């Protein structure tokens, strides 16, 4: 039985494809959903790193507010969290620290050289999380 579902979102439409599946799970199990966005600002010389970080967090909060509105509109109990740092590690740490029952996320489906170069957040989460994971690969 899932009572707390963590849904990491990266701001892409592909990542959001998991939301209808999470809606279904949340309604069946009476679960609370937490939408998580990990913000990380890459700074360059001459940029104010603090301001850049604040902008990244603000953008993440605005994005999650829209996703939260949709989830509430379909009758799901939802809250949002923004964390700052390494995406996969922050997802795993949040799931462990807040005792989530499930991590549900879309995968971008990268393979081969692209995955080697860019990495896969879903793969990193899958290999390090201590809670069950639902990976959805949209077509």
Image (cartoon, rainbow, N blue to C red):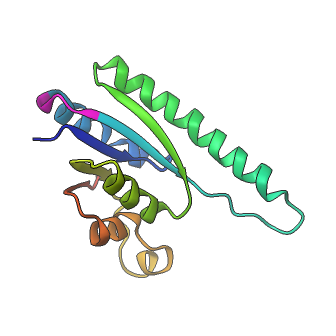
Residue occupying the far right of the picture: 46
Report the number of discs.
Answer: 0
Q: Which residues are magenta?
A: 28-32
Residue 8, magenta (yes or no): no
Quarter holding residue 137: bottom left
Query: Is 25 drawn above or below residue 131 in the view shown?
Result: above
Q: Nearer the viewer, residue 66 or 92?
A: 92
Quarter holding residue 5: top left
What x and y, as percent, mark residue 53?
70, 52
Query: Is 105 drawn above or below residue 66 in the view shown?
Result: below
Q: Residue at x 48, y 50 (%)?
A: 10
Q: Residue at x 33, y 42 (%)?
A: 17
Quarter holding residue 3: top left
What x and y, as percent, mark residue 130?
24, 63
Query: Is 28 drawn above or below residue 11 in the view shown?
Result: above
Query: Is 32 drawn above or below residue 47 in the view shown?
Result: above
What x and y, as percent, mark residue 109?
34, 64
Q: Residue at x 33, y 53 (%)?
A: 95
Q: Residue at x 41, y 65 (%)?
A: 121
What x and y, as percent, mark residue 16?
39, 42
Q: Nearer the viewer, residue 136 or 53?
A: 53
Please identify the quadrant where the N terminus is shown.
top left
């Amino acid at each position: 039985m899932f009572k707390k579902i963590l849904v990491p979102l990266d701001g892409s439409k592909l990542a959001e494809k998991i939301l209808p599946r999470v809606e279904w799970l949340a309604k069946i199990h009476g679960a609370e959903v937490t939408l998580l966005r990990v913000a990380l600002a890459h700074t360059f010389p001459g940029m104010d790193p603090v301001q850049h970080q604040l902008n990244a967090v603000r953008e993440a909060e605005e994005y999650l507010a829209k996703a939260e509105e949709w989830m509430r509109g379909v009758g799901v109990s939802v809250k949002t969290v923004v964390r700052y740092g390494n995406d996969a590690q922050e997802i795993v740490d949040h799931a462990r620290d807040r005792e989530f029952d499930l991590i549900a996320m879309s995968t971008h489906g990268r393979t081969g050289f692209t995955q080697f170069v860019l990495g896969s957040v879903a793969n990193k989460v899958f290999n390090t999380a201590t809670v069950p994971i639902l990976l959805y690969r949209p077509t």
